[in-house]
Every structure is written in C-alpha cells, then in structure tokens.
C-alpha cells in the first residue's frame, strides 16, 4: 500500500493534472490565481490542425527512425566484435562503452558541441583532410546538419545499452548449435542470419521498442544544441516543442494537450513491449 501511494503521488497525480489542464485555457494568468476556463477539446483541435505541430511530429519521427536503425546496427556490430576479442581488449571496449553510457546527456551534448563548433576540432580536421578552409562553418545553423549532429549524440549514448544487451543474448547461444552450422558449411553471415538473429529475436524486439520510446521523447540533446546555435523554429522535436509552448509561450493548456497526445502514443508503443514480455513469461 505505501508503494502504491508513493507511485500515485509522483506519477498518477501529474498525469491527472496534465489531462485536466489540456481541457482548460491555462496561461500565465492562471499561475497567479485566475480561475482556469474550461474550453473542451479546443486545445486538441488547435494542436491537431497546426501545420507547425505536424512538421514537428514528422521531424521527430524521422530523427527517431534514423537513431533507432543506427543504434541497433552499430550496437549489434560492436556486440559481435566483442565476442571475437580477447579478454583484455573486451574489457577495454566494455569500459569505454560504460563511460559513454554513464555520461549525462547534457554533458555529452556540451562536449560534442565543442567538437562541431565553428572553430572546433571537426572543422580543423576537415580543413586538414580536404585542403579546403572549413573554419567558421556552423553545423548547427542548417536544420539537416543540426539533426545529423543530434543523431550522432543520441546514437553515441544509446549504443552501449544495445551492445551489452545483444552481447548477453548472443553469448547464450549453445556452442554446439554454432558448430553444427559450421559443419554444414554455413559461413559467418549465414550463421548470423539463420542462427543467431532468430535466437535473439525477442531481445531485438524489446530493444527496438525501448529505443523508439527513448528517441521519440528525446529532450536534453536537442535543447542544449539549440542553445549553441540551432534555430528552434526549424529543428525542435516534440519534447522540446512542448517545453517551448509551455514555458516560452506560457500556454500550458496547449502544451498539456500535446503532452497527452505524446503520452497516448508512448503508451501504445509500451503496450507492444509489455504484451511481449507477459507472453514470454507465460511461456
């Protein structure tokens, strides 16, 4: 009972308040005591008919798809690499991955911001390699390159989790199964495609669902990069857009409607994860 009470206070109450505010005209005036006016579904209609919100959703989905694909591919490749390394090198790789995984998102974004700074190391290296003068080139001014930088930061921080999880799953495949495949003439690629991937399909499904949830609601990386030179109107994702609507425009009711929509979407995605988990436990 105490556990349910605590969870209700820190989780259920904010969600209930979010839903209530989404049906109200809640602005800065309401913060100072002015009663909030009930406006029904007006906030939802305004959100769903706003072309800018549509653009934010498409941008968020595009960034999420790119990050999930890159995270899964790179994480799996590094896991396969770790399986072939000796104990010493595997330990070094694991430590490096843990350092990347343990670094706070804001700290990592600041470091990457120094790297892609107009006078940073990336432009210096490009000038040396290509022979052209890249000094002063801003990677954050253009929306495409801004999102590319954001994707690199997000993937860099997410690969370790996928790598460790895939490594744990791949190393549980019985050795005799892999030996039998080799005796039958299966090469590395065929063994991976027909033996290893089917064995860890459930793990891959869970990782994909979790990655979709994490990357769809990404906030710190986008918000911090915008402070380093990005144009908010051209590169905000859904999490940052909700924050800007609430605290920059002081339209808390409209932001709450966006939050409810995002929460419903994430709950739908989470349902896939929960259903699969329960199904596996039932087996």
Image (cartoon, rainbow, N blue to C red):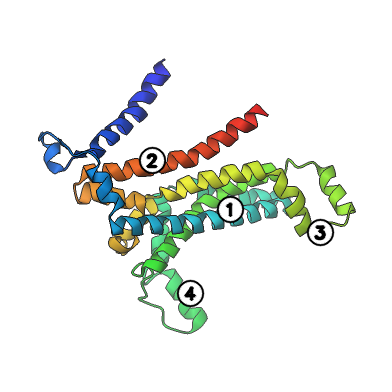
Label 4 environment density (alpha carbons within 10 Å; few <14, some 14–19, many ≥20): few
Of residues 225 and 29, the one nearer the viewer is: 29
Disc 4 secondary structure class = helix
Label 2 environment density (alpha carbons within 10 Å; few <14, some 14–19, many ≥20): some
- Mark number, residue 72: 1
Q: Nearer the viewer, mark 1 or mark 2?
A: 2
Residue underneath mark 4: 125
Cα distance, mark 2 to mark 4? 42 Å
Left or right: 26 in relation to 44? left
Of residues 261 and 12, the one nearer the viewer is: 261
Q: Give yes or no for contact between labels 3 and 1 (Cβ–Cβ under 8 Å).
A: no
Residue underneath mark 3: 187
Q: Give yes or no for contact between labels 1 and 4 (Cβ–Cβ under 8 Å).
A: no
Q: Earlier in the sequence, mark 3 or mark 1?
A: 1
Cα distance, mark 2 to mark 3? 45 Å
- Mark number, residue 263: 2
Cα distance, mark 1 to mark 4? 28 Å
Q: Residue at x 66, y 46 (%)?
A: 167
């Amino acid at each position: 009972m105490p556990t349910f009470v605590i969870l209700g206070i820190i989780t259920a109450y904010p969600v209930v308040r979010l839903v209530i505010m989404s049906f109200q005209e809640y602005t800065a005036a309401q913060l100072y005591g002015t009663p909030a006016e009930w406006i029904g579904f007006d906030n939802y209609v305004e959100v769903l008919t706003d072309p800018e919100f549509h653009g934010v959703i498409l941008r968020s989905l595009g960034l999420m798809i790119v990050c999930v694909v890159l995270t899964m591919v790179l994480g799996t490749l590094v896991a396969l690499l770790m399986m072939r390394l000796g104990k010493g090198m595997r330990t070094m790789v694991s430590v490096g991955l843990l350092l990347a995984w343990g670094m706070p998102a804001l700290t990592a974004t600041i470091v990457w911001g120094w790297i892609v700074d107009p006078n940073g190391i990336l432009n210096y290296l490009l000038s040396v390699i290509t022979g052209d003068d890249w000094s002063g080139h801003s990677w954050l001014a253009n929306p495409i390159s801004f999102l590319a930088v954001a994707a690199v930061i997000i993937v860099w921080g997410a690969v370790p989790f996928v790598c460790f999880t895939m490594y744990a799953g791949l190393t549980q495949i019985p050795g005799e199964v892999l030996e039998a495949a080799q005796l039958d003439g299966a090469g590395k690629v065929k063994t991976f495609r027909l033996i290893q991937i089917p064995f860890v399909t459930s793990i891959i499904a869970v990782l994909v669902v979790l990655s979709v949830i994490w990357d769809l609601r990404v906030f710190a990386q986008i918000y911090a990069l915008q402070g380093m030179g990005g144009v908010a109107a051209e590169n905000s994702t859904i999490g940052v857009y909700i924050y800007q609507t609430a605290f920059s425009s002081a339209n808390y009711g409209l932001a709450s409607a966006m939050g409810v929509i995002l929460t419903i979407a994430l709950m739908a995605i989470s349902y896939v994860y929960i259903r699969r988990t329960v199904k596996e436990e039932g087996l």
